[in-house]
Image (cartoon, grey):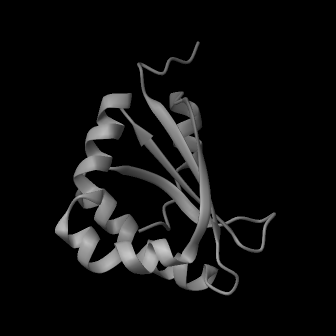
Amino acid sequence: MNTTDGRLLEIRMFRVRPGTREEFDRISREGTVPMMRRYGFTVLACGPQLDEDDGYYLVRVFDSAQQRLDLSQRLYASQEWIDNYEQPVMAMIVDYRHALLPAYGAIVAGLADPTVG
C-alpha cells in the first residue's frame, strides 16, 4: 500500500489573460520556478493546459501543510519576488484555483517533469 507520510500534492490551475500564456510560461520556467526551488519548493511540473487556451498549471509537493505555508510566506514576502515577479505575474493572472491531494510516492515520481526549471 502506498503511503503519503503526510505529504501533500498541490495542483494550481491558473487562467491568464488572453495572449499572455506564452510569456507566463517563459517567466515561470526562467524565473519563478527556479526561484521556488531555491527557496526549498519541490516543483514537479508546470506548463500550458491542454484543454484551455488561457490555462496554465503548476504542480508542487510539500512534506506537510505547515511546510507549504512556511515556504509560501517566505517566498511571496521576499524582496526578490516583490521586485521581479509580483507585478508582471499578477497582471497576467485572471484567477486561479488549487487542489491539495495526498502525495503518494508513485504519483509524485510519475508527475515529475525533468524539463521544468
- Dividing the picture into quadrants, the one containing residue 33 is bottom left
The extreme top residue here reads: 1
Residue 100, percent from left and from top: 55, 35
Query: Does residue 16 appear to the left or right of 58 in the view shown?
Result: right
Above or below, comparing residue 113 to residue 92 in the picture: above
Residue 86 figure quarter: bottom left
Quarter of the picture containing the N terminus is top right
Q: Residue furthest left?
A: 79
Q: Residue at x 41, y 19 (%)?
A: 5
> Which quarter of the figure has residue 19?
bottom right
Q: How many marks?
A: 0
Asked whether 52 or 7 is in front, the reply is 52
In percent of width and height, residue 51 lies at 81, 63
Q: Is residue 13 visible?
A: no
Residue 97 screen position, x and y as percent = 61, 50
Q: Tell me what residue is drawn at x 55 percent, y 77 percent.
A: 92
